[in-house]
Amino acid sequence: MEQVKVNFGGEQKTFPRGITPLEIAKALNAKLAKEALAAKLNGVIVDMDSKVYNDCTLELITFEDEEGKRTFWHSTSHVMAQAVKRLFPDAKLTIGPAIEEGFYYDFDRGESFTPQDLEKIEKEMEKIINENYSFKRLDTTREEAIKKLMEMDEPYKIELVQALPENADISFYQQGEFIDLCAGPHIPATGRIKAFKLTSLAGAYWRGDEHNKMLQRIYGISFPKKSMLDEYLTRIEEAKKRDHRKLGRELGIFSMHEEGPGFPFFHPKGMVIWNILTDFWRKEHRKKGYHEIKTPIILSEKLWRMSGHWDHYKENMYFTKIDEQDFAVKPMNCPGGILLFKADVHSYRELPLRLGELGLVHRHELSGVLHGLMRVRCFTQDDAHIFMTTSQIEQEIIGVIDLVDYFYKIFGFKYHVELSTRPENSMGSDELWEKATKALKNALDKKGLPYKINEGDGAFYGPKIDFHLKDSIGRTWQCGTIQLDFQMPEKFDLTYVGPDGEKHRPVMIHRVIFGSLERFIGILIEHYAGALPVWLSPVQARILPISEKHLDYAKEVKNKLEESDIRVELDERNEKIGYKIREAQMQKIPYMLIVGDKEIADGNISVRQREIGDIGSKNIVDFIAEVKQKEENKQ
RNA sequence: GCUGAUGUGGCUCAGGGGUAGAGCAGCGCACUCGUAAUGCGCAGGCCGAGGGUUCGAAUCCCUCCAUCAGCUCCA
């Protein structure tokens, strides 16, 4: 019998040709054989019952591996589809992939699923899992696939086959009576799914295009162990507690009102955070050679026609009339900044000219996308426009990349970068777009930053580099962005005088670091679960007198701290100390200062730290120094 | 905007055709207290808005609005 050499975990063994990874796994390690969900042959992921015909390196994939999870979830989506087909035979199959956490399957059905349907589907899935069908791969040709799908009456699947490239391998997978077009791989059998839950129900457009039919999407998650599902559900519960909308209300940071959908109200404590961020921003930008400007919120419609916003951004804008003339509320700060630039003649010696603006913009966002502070209809961008010569492009982009990195590191944010290229509805020549996109790419490559390319996602006037941050449940939000623009300088005929005494055309960068102050504060709240570090805390310390007798001393302490610009509150309420501590703790105040007879006697304060608890008594001067030290270090 | 769900005091939620309920928060009184909730009392709601059905609607129906999840779209 012919043999194949299999390299596994650094050891080489021989097996009969045509053996399956599952058989190899059983021969090598019974435990691993039980856990393995799929295999990799020379780096290519395959089913456990695929055949090994050639010498190869074998890896076994378990739920611990990213690919293992995806395979597991993808297989669960097939189980769900099988259950749906049993219960609702008229539902048409579309796609059912694994996602970052779990899976979904989209169905086309006359009516939508109800939460009761979900329960029924879960029950049916339970049955399918207990029936422990194995997943079988069936390779086929394009013609046969289409024929089969026509028999099955699955029009969406036919569309998918037709969209596959000429030379693509086409396969079906079958478990029990259920067959689905699928590239695989799949887990060995349905019985491997020990725990699952259908988590939500939503509409989704076919192929993600809003012009297409809306399908019914069911989301779910599954695990090879029951305990893992419980852990997952607990984690989701915990994450919900970090929701900035909940914390924002509880901590008195902001509120939203029905009277102003998408227009956040910042409360005093929210404004403290806001002002700390903007103070910090101003200081750092001064250091980096930025000048601050301010431009109006409402400007003539003519300006917006000239800038291209009228043609490319009108849907998102608000309009108004002043003295019979048409005006628009600004959705971006650039045209204002450009007018300001044009107010003077500029020499090449001034370039790069970096003009920063904390600009309030209004954008009409679709009602369904509003989300706390993360997606609003008016927000303050920490904007800046850099006017420069062509030769300064790269260094300026790198400068901004560094500034973003510097800022985000201070908050301990991990971010990922995306490069967005020319969108469909955009202006300018291909040549300039090409040039601009290349400049951004070069800068990223030079910095060695990994990035994902987002085709067609750029601004209408130029390509952009986006910096994305995650919220508490892992949704990512675009915060920083750097956009390179050759169009606006052209449209507005911007010039500077070169060393040759002639007029030249500058290039512009539009950029934000925080992105929007609103969104950034939302991210901050979720990142710290509301327990902001001392330098950002609206209230850094709260004084808690043991009883009313100690109020005078408490006030004395308060005055001293206030003299040192420490943000301090005094809890004058006639309550027990435990009660006051609990409240301060829930308000996530970093320091609780307890004063009673003892403290009065030795002129000290007892310090309780939010994270640690009672850390004993301290004199006031030392305490002030500690807070100042933390502020200094942005802790 | 689309699909689905939800909307009851400041907050969290119960009630589900026959005159609105709890806990927390608030206010008052007592207690004067040592590291995460002292006790008692009081007040607070056109049950998201507008129509309809009904002798009677928070409850059933319709239309809007807002919120939540997702889709699409974007800082």
Image (cartoon, grey):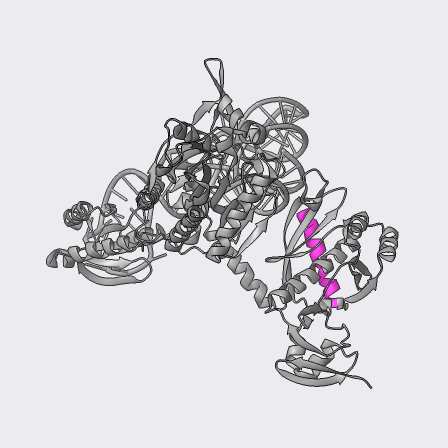
The mark total stands at: 0
| Residue A122 falls within the magenta-colored stretch | yes
Looking at the rendering, which quadrant does residue A334 occupy?
top left
- In the rendering, at what x and y percent does residue B20 appear? 49, 36
Looking at the rendering, which quadrant does residue A13 occupy?
bottom right
**Residue drawn 76% across and 73% down?**
A49
From this viewpoint, is residue A514 visible? no
Characterize the magenta stretch by its predominant secondary structure: helix
- In the rendering, at what x and y percent does residue A275 appear? 32, 41
Which residue is at the far top? A324
Q: Is residue A331 left or right of residue A613?
A: right
Nearest the eye: A179 or A46: A46
Q: Is residue A571 left or right of residue A124?
A: left
**Residue drawn 68% across and 54% down?**
A119
**Residue drawn 41% across and 43% down?**
A249
| Residue A425 falls within the magenta-colored stretch | no
Nearest the eye: A428 or A361: A428
Nearest the eye: A382 or A124: A382
Residue A227 sits above or below residue A594 on the image? below
Residue A39 sits above or below residue A14 on the image? above
Which residue is at the far front? A500
Nearest the eye: A86 or A168: A168
Q: Which residues are magenta?
A: A114-130
Q: Is residue A610 left or right of residue A98?
A: left
Looking at the rendering, which quadrant does residue A352 occupy?
top left
- In the rendering, at what x and y percent does residue A124 appear? 74, 58
Q: Quadrant of the C terminus of chain A?
A: bottom left
From this viewpoint, is residue A432 visible? yes
